[in-house]
Amino acid sequence: MKKVNLNPRVNKNIVLTVLLCLGMAWSVWQILSAAPDPGHLWVEIGDSLNDALTVARGGTGQTSLTAENVLIGNTTGAVKFAAPGTTGNVLASNGSGWTSSALTGLVTLLYSDEADTSVLNTSTTETIMKSWVMNIDPALYRFYIIEADVNANQGHAANANVTFTWNFKVNNTTLIDSVQQRGVGMLAVAGVKTVSSISATSTNSFAFSPPSLEITADPGTSNAAITMAVHGFRVYGVK
């Protein structure tokens, strides 16, 4: 008769496998049941998930940032803002802070035409020599400087010496200011050119339609045979 072993030995491989499976199941359970805590109490960062992160914790102290504004430091307080302000403003220091301020004193060349005009032999009719249609709102600058390089040549005029006037105009209307209608005496001997630089300033009060800035030549009645030309014609805006 065959002998039966009533106390079989436990297979250690089976035991290890069971323990490994139990350990894996416990690990998965710990991961799935873990609370969504990053390691800090929420009160250490803010009162709730919607609170602004404080400056002390590396945040801004603000729950939103205003579009296009510059952020300004505020020691341990929430950051402050500087709005852009008017077009053309810059971020300027007032000695203790930063604000959006108009830039003053800056001179910008807005237009330049350095080509020579055709020499014009005119009668007594005032003639536009060069012009520029302004493509900006005049209010962008505090005032404007207009300048030109001109010459005149007395050819067949009755007088040996001649004079006439150059005018700066807006839409064919003489600029209203004591220095805007710039009368320049052009002294010329027969066959000899006299070259001069002339300039004027204008406020920004002319209507934006848009305006046309012009330089005109205006011979006197007795000087109909004078010839004239314009070289450079420039417009500057001053902040």
Image (spheres, rainbow, N blue to C red):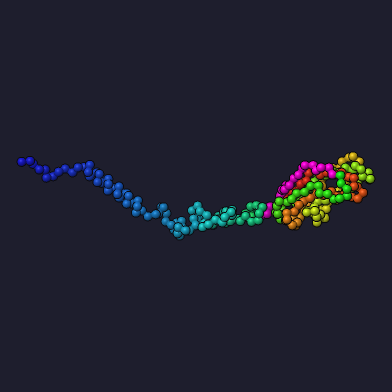
Q: Position of residue 188 (x, y in %)?
A: 89, 43
Residue 114, position in %: x, y?
A: 77, 42
In the displayed structure image, the side of residue 222 where residue 53 appears, left or right: left
The one nearer the camera, 107 or 59, is 107
Based on the displayed image, in which of its 4 quarters is residue 8 positioned? Answer: top left
Total numbered labels: 0
Q: Is residue 95 visible?
A: no
Up the image or down, 225 lies above or below 72; here it is: above
**Residue 226 position by quadrant:** top right
Within the magenta stretch, is there residue 92?
no
Q: Which residues are magenta?
A: 101-120
Residue at the limit of the structure toward the top, as seen here: 191
What is the x, y in percent for residue 200?
80, 51
Asked whether residue 113 is drawn in magenta, I would say yes
Query: Residue shown at 66%/52% (left/top)?
Result: 88
Residue pictured at 27% horizontal, 46% vertical: 21
- Residue at horizontal 32%, vertical 49%? 27
Residue 117 visible to an observer of this rendering: yes
Residue lying at the far bottom of the rendered structure: 47
| Picture residue at 42% right of the left edge, 54% below the top | 40
